[in-house]
Image (cartoon, rainbow, N blue to C red):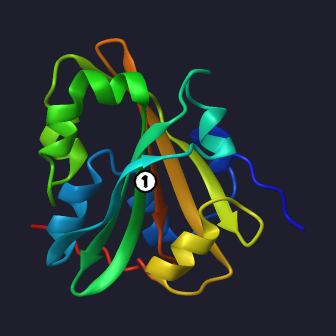
Amino acid sequence: MKSFRWYSAQKFFAQPLPSPIWRWLQQAHLTQAICSQYQHQLQVISQGQSKILFEEAQLLPEDSNPVWIREICHIGDNQPLVYARVTVPNKTYQEFADDFNALQNRPIGDTLLFKNPDVLRSTFHYALIHDAAPFYEQSCKLLGLAPEFYARYSLFTWKTYPLLITEIFTPDLKRWKTIA
């Protein structure tokens, strides 16, 4: 059985990766990148109160349960490309509930985070998701069966309130058109 572990960019990219997936994993503004390459749709899978996963609890403050979870799928040219899970500790949710509830089918990064001067983002951490790892089952449901998926997470701090975004990429995410 393979073990699951998050890696810094330096360690993760020390191994050879397929060229297209490497480029996708490096994109700071994923929705914009997908929109530049595909006909994009954002599908909200679910959002609401839930229990935190053990792996998420390791990355967020101790008093994070329950959490508000938003699961979405980025669709490109009618194909699922990226499964994303936003994990928001209860205190963060209470502080910004109106903002989170108003998202509807808009991406959280472009809508609430990237242009907000009160938001800081950590560096990315990366992993290979396989059958013994968290997120694997949901990734297979949304992205299709695969032996493994590339994933990344980053922590955001909005004022002093944390939230976590984890993104899992389909192995079929190959296309990267050069934009003139």
> Residue beneath label 1, please?
85
Figure quadrant of residue 63: top right
Residue at position x 65%, y 49% from top? 12
Residue at position x 42%, y 66% from top? 83
Q: Quadrant of the N terminus?
A: bottom right
Figure quadrant of residue 119: top left
Q: Secondary structure at mark 1?
A: strand
- The residue lying furthest to the top in this view is 160
Figure quadrant of residue 81: bottom left
- The residue lying furthest to the right in this view is 1
Does residue 115 lie above or below 76 as drawn? above
How crowded is the residue under tag 1: few (<14 C-alpha within 10 Å), some, or many (20+)?
A: many
Q: Is residue 9 left or right of 31 when viewed as pictured? A: right
Does residue 85 lie above or below 160 as drawn? below
Nearer-the-camera pick, 10 or 113: 113
Locate residue 149, reporting x and y percent.
59, 70
Does residue 42 lie above or below 13 as drawn? below
Locate residue 118, reporting x and y percent.
21, 16
Nearer-the-camera pick, 124 or 98: 98
